Image (cartoon, helix red, strand yellow):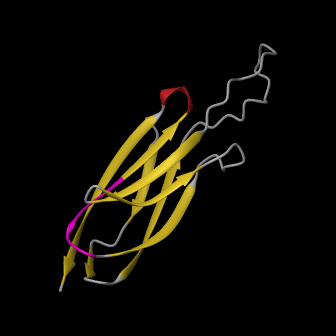
Amino acid sequence: MARALIKVPPTAKRGEVIEIRTLISHPMETGYRPGADGKVVPRNIIRRFFCRYNGEVVFSAELHPAIAANPNIVFHTVATESGTLSFTWEGDQGFNQTESVGITVTA
C-alpha cells in the first residue's frame, strides 16, 4: 500500500473556498527503463485521481506517464456541509487506494 498524505482544513464556514492538498508515495515506473536482467520494467503509474465530497465527485484528474513519481495534487472546492472527503488513486497493475478525511462546516 502506498503512503498518502492529505491536508484538509478540519473546519470551514459554509460557502468558504478550501484548499485541499494530497501527495501519494508510489513506486512509479515509466515502462521504458531496463531492469537488472535487461528486460524492460513494466509500466506502473497512477492513472486516475478522484475526490468525492459526501459521495459526489468534486475533482478528478487523468494522469499520464510524465506524472511525477509521487504526485502532489492541489485543488480547491467550496465547503457546503459537514461530511467526508474521500480520495481515490487508481493505477496500473490493479493499484487502487482510497483514503478519507472528515470536515466540519459551520454556518
Residue 30 is left or right of residue 72, and the answer is right
Residue 63 is left or right of residue 33, and the answer is left
Q: Residue 24 at x, y = what percent?
A: 50, 49
Residue 59 appears in which quarter of the rendering? bottom left
Residue 103 appears in which quarter of the rendering? bottom left
- The residue lying at 78 percent from left, 29 percent from top is 33
Quadrant in the picture for the N terminus? top left
- The residue lying at 25 percent from left, 83 percent from top is 14
Image: magenta residue range: 80-86
**Up/down of 20 relative to 28, above or below:** below
Residue 77 appears in which quarter of the rendering? bottom left
- The residue lying at 71 percent from left, 23 percent from top is 41
Q: Residue 69 at x, y = what percent?
A: 64, 46
**Up/down of 70 relative to 80, above or below:** above
Q: Residue 89 at x, y = what percent?
A: 46, 45
Nearer-the-camera pick, 23 or 94: 94
Residue 103 is left or right of residue 39, and the answer is left
- Was residue 17 drawn as part of the magenta stretch in this picture? no
Nearer-the-camera pick, 84 or 5: 84
**Up/down of 17 relative to 2, above or below:** below
- The residue lying at 21 percent from left, 73 percent from top is 81
Farthest front residue?
Answer: 56
Q: Residue 49 at x, y = what percent?
A: 49, 50
Residue 9 is left or right of residue 26, and the answer is left
